[in-house]
Amino acid sequence: MKRQYWAQQAERGLLGLFFVALVWLPLPLGSNRHWAAAFFAAVVWVLLALSGLVRLASATSATTSDHQTGLGSHVVLALLVLFTAWTSLQLTPFGHTEDVHETRLYVLRCIGYVGAFWLVQLLVTSDRRRMTVLVGLLSAGVVQALTAMVLFSAASHYEFLDFEFTQGTRATGTFPQSDALANYLLLTLSAGLAVMLAQMGSARPAPRNVQWQHRVHAAMDFMMSGKMVVRLMLVVMVIALVLTRSRMGNGVFFLSLFVVAAWVMGASRQLRKAAGVLVVSLLVVDIVIIGQWVGLSKVINRMEATEIIAQAASAQASAESVAAPHAPVHREESLHERMRPARDALAMVRERPWTGFGGGAFYTAFPRYKVESLELPYNHAHNDYVEIAADVGLPGLLLLAGVALLTAVRVVQLMRDRSTPHVRGVAVGVGMGLLCALLHALVDLNLQINANAMTLTVLLAVVWSVPTKRTTTSLRSR
């Protein structure tokens, strides 16, 4: 018993260190620097090694006897390992890469994702620990949102880690660009949604004939409870999301919110009221009131100014140049222009559909396929699906698609589990995070940002940490 108690305390300490690492993850430019990605991967694998030593030292399987996640989590982990191995093959004489240095760093990042997924499976053995990870993601999002709001209000120009920031136009936080911050906030908002619904779903429905005094008392209890704290944290992140002025980020958030809310209301009777109340409060409080205060209209103006048809964009530019030939013309990038690098990069996929040009080697190989009219230098394709296929080939893209598909099936299965509201809350949060990531990947490069890809990996790992069978013994106290 002493060994088991010591093992539980040691694992809680390791989980606390992982909590701190998640908060630190986005601070150094979204960990999108080589040293930051390597450092976080090293931290993850050190924690993973210590977790293994704790299990060996405890010399008992009691800590995991009630925690059986099933075959699915092992299959997803195997797919991530196979993706890493496939990418590593490009560094051997049997593979090909246009940039050996970048491919090595790409493999290192993949090793970090594998370690993070595995670490969550080892440490998260109870509902309480699962909530700890979700609260860690939520806290990291709030820290990043508050940082972005303060820097945005300062409207200053400064340099951080050899990267120049100009604050005051669009909130960026500590990320290299606003859209990357928007995607990170989408993932952490999804984690917060899971925490919120897990708590709301656990409340017992009040009888219809209850007196109004009891209803007022229940409302006051909610105002003073942890649920209200989580709700305020969601408000802070929504404010920061609006301040990014990200068209796709804000559009994906509300579209995913409506889709997931409709799905929850149809799939779960117990979460139907909670989900409806949360969606309505997000729309009324965060959008109608706070959104107008922080400038939601500017996001709408950016969407309205976006030209869908390329011919209309070129005609407008020509007319403005004739009217004022020496004046700079500023207009929003059209959807046609935004997707131009991805269309040009399809030639790379057609040339090397199986092996790709090497993980992380897109910047090196793309100039040969870029159309001359595409004047700006592009480090990425602004479409994660096309860039992954160009980097590691269609087999690598299919491996990651398998991870997303299996996780989506897992989310749907957990929504059918009527044993605990905790499980349903986790399923809803992860489902929304996955949907946001898949939609945003169509027109942006968020999976190429280490902090965003790592956060998504941890979020997916959380849903796979839920046991396949709930035993009669409570797991909450561990």
Image (cartoon, helix red, strand yellow):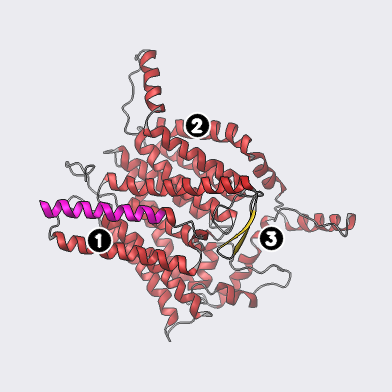
Type of amino acid at the residue the image marks with label 1: Ser
The first of marks 2 and 3 along the sequence is 2
Q: How many residues crowd mark 1 within 10 Å: few (<14), some (14–19), many (20+)? A: many
How far from the left and from the top, in percent, is residue 269? 36, 32
Q: Is residue 471 left or right of residue 223?
A: left
In the displayed structure image, the side of residue 401 where residue 470 appears, left or right: left
To which residue does mark 3 refer? 337
Q: Residues within 10 Å of mark 3 (few under 14, many from 20)?
A: some
Q: Horizontal placement of 130 versus 436: left or right?
A: left
Q: Which residue lies at the image location 50% right of the left edge and 49% below the top edge?
A: 144
Residue 54 x, y percent position in the rendering? 20, 60
Write down the residue under mark 2: 281
In this view, 471 is above or below 465: above
Please report the residue visible at 69 percent of the width from the left and 72 percent of the height from the top.
371
Q: Are marks 1 and 2 in contact (CB under 8 Å)?
A: no
Q: Amino acid at mark 3?
A: Glu
Pinpoint residue 34: horizontal percent, then vertical percent: 48, 69
Q: CA distance from mark 2 to mark 3?
A: 36 Å
Q: Residue at x 42, y 43 (%)?
A: 192
Which x, y percent locates residue 204? 31, 27
* Residue marked by disc 1: 51
Q: Is residue 464 magenta?
A: no
With 289 as the anchor, is 219 left or right in this view? left
Of badges 3 and 1, nearer the viewer stands 1
Q: Real-space Cα distance between discs 3 and 1?
A: 48 Å
Start-end of magenta stretch = 1-22
Q: Is residue 90 visible?
A: yes
Tell me if mark 2 has few (under 14), some (14-19) or many (20+) residues whose alpha carbon lies within 10 angstroms of its own.
some
Query: CB atoms at circles 2 and 3 under 8 Å apart?
Result: no
Closer mark to the observer between disc 1 and disc 2: 1
SS for callout 2: helix
Residue 16 on the magenta span: yes
